[in-house]
Amino acid sequence: MHALAERVVTFLSREGLIPEGARVAVAVSGGGDSVALWCLLAELTEHARFAVVGLAHLNHQLRGQASDADARFCDELASRAGLPGIVESIDVAAIAQAERISLEHAGHRARHAFFDRAAGRLGATHVALGHTLDDQAETYLLRLLRGAGAAGLSAMRPGLGRIVRPLLQVRRVELREYLTLRGMSFREDASNQDQRVSRNRVRHDLLPHLGRYAPRVVEALAREAEIARADDEWLDRAAHESHATLVKTDEHGVTVDADGLVVLHPALSRRVVRRLLASLSDRACEFAHVERVRAMATGSVSRVDLPGLRAERRGRVIYVARRAGRGAARELGTPFEYQLAVPGEVAVPEAAVTLRAERGDDSGPDGSHAVAAVAVGDATRELTVSIQMQAGPLRVRNWRPGDWYRPAGLNGHRKKLQDLFVDRKVERLRRHRVPVVVDARDRVMWVVGFGLSADFLVTEARPREATASMIILTVRPLGDQL
């Protein structure tokens, strides 16, 4: 095994990125980094206990014939390895213009939606991306220059959902040396030299300049990102605990214990405030907004207007609610509904999750019936549940007035979803984003993150004929949050 491959194996093991039995799709742009990743993972499959199941390439249609040539190169790369190549094209520029977002943002969203589709077609459990130590350093600098906090300075995470980055501790120059040794060619993207792109300016101007003061600046910046990631994870857990203690939610809005907020360390109080503002509105929350709410806790301010929200000091609490007027209806969320084939997968961008349905067998090695655990949580991590097989396609939609089901564990009693959300203290805005899986008769099977219907739950008490086949449903975060 090549020494570089051994380092990648060590990194994968340390971070727990690709478990035994995993099926990995490799995202390949045609550039040197992703081609090297393709070769390295192919080499590792001879020694590791995971399988590379195919290649995924998205043509962004930004460079005309050069983009088309990249797509052909990647398709041929997969063919030479005897593996499937999923190649799609999408007009990223048109998306950016239609949605009035940057090319970078549009490309990021398009790529990760494509990764989900490609993984579904390949039956992949993981999608490997070729980001390097150099990319990590560049991302850290870009976030630093934009004034990001610890979460932003964490830069790119080694793994999030099904996305993994096996090369985050490998320099770009090392990958070029590896490709030369292997005699592998790759495509050069001329747009990487375009100085109008901020990342390219950081790569070709700022980093080399900083290197004159610190020769190992790339390693130093990447190390700072790793430190920030650990700090952010710890602070986020602590803020979650403080939020649960200080913040109360009812039908009208959110109240915060002002005295409790004051005694928190600023690092925690800012996160608590940011979390509660995000729970009420999907509009941008800036540092200044957070500080204005924190000033209310000290009594220096009694009332502030925020994007889509209003906050008032009422005795010992701060009351935050959505402002009436233009845009209020939009904040409640627009209805969504998607068909979910079995087997199949569907992205639900409104909830930032992907749902997958697979056929399963209920019998274990000893012939016993499978029993599915009730799914709980908020779908920020991957969850898998089992339900009885039903005829006809499934659908995924948001909840509607009058929806009800029989939650597992309530002895068959019915419960309206509206009451479920009130009991669980789910903010009104978030309720409209919760995915609900229904059958062909529009019966609620699963309220994602809140539990299965007892009418569909697989249990030992059901006759074997009734559970001869099952549907395995999996929910996980949509794409990657950089």
Image (tube, helix red, strand yellow):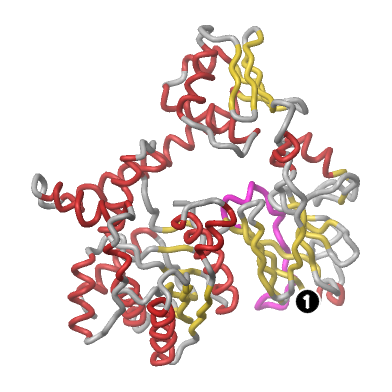
Count how many numbered circles sit on residues in the image.
Answer: 1
Q: Viewed as shown, does residue 299 lie left or right of 334?
A: left
Task: State the residue at coordinates (28%, 52%).
Answer: 138
Query: Residue 387, position in %: x, y?
Result: 77, 65
Q: Viewed as shown, does residue 479 lie left or right of 345?
A: left
Looking at the image, residue 59 lies above or below residue 480: below
Nearer to us in this view, 24 or 107: 107
Q: Quadrant of the N terminus?
A: bottom left
Label 1 SS: loop
* Residue 474 visible in the shown view: no
Looking at the image, residue 445 lies above or below residue 221: below
Q: Which residues are magenta?
A: 362-382
Query: Residue 13, position in %: x, y?
Result: 35, 64
Residue marked by disc 1? 469
Task: State the residue at coordinates (69%, 65%).
Answer: 473
Q: Could you say which quadrant of the image residue 253 lies in? A: top right
Task: State the residue at coordinates (91%, 64%).
Answer: 441
Looking at the image, residue 326 lies above or below residue 336: above
Q: Viewed as shown, does residue 56 lie left or right of 31?
A: right
Looking at the image, residue 386 lies above or below residue 183: above
Q: Could you say which quadrant of the image residue 428 lies in? A: top right
Q: Main secondary structure of the magenta part?
A: loop
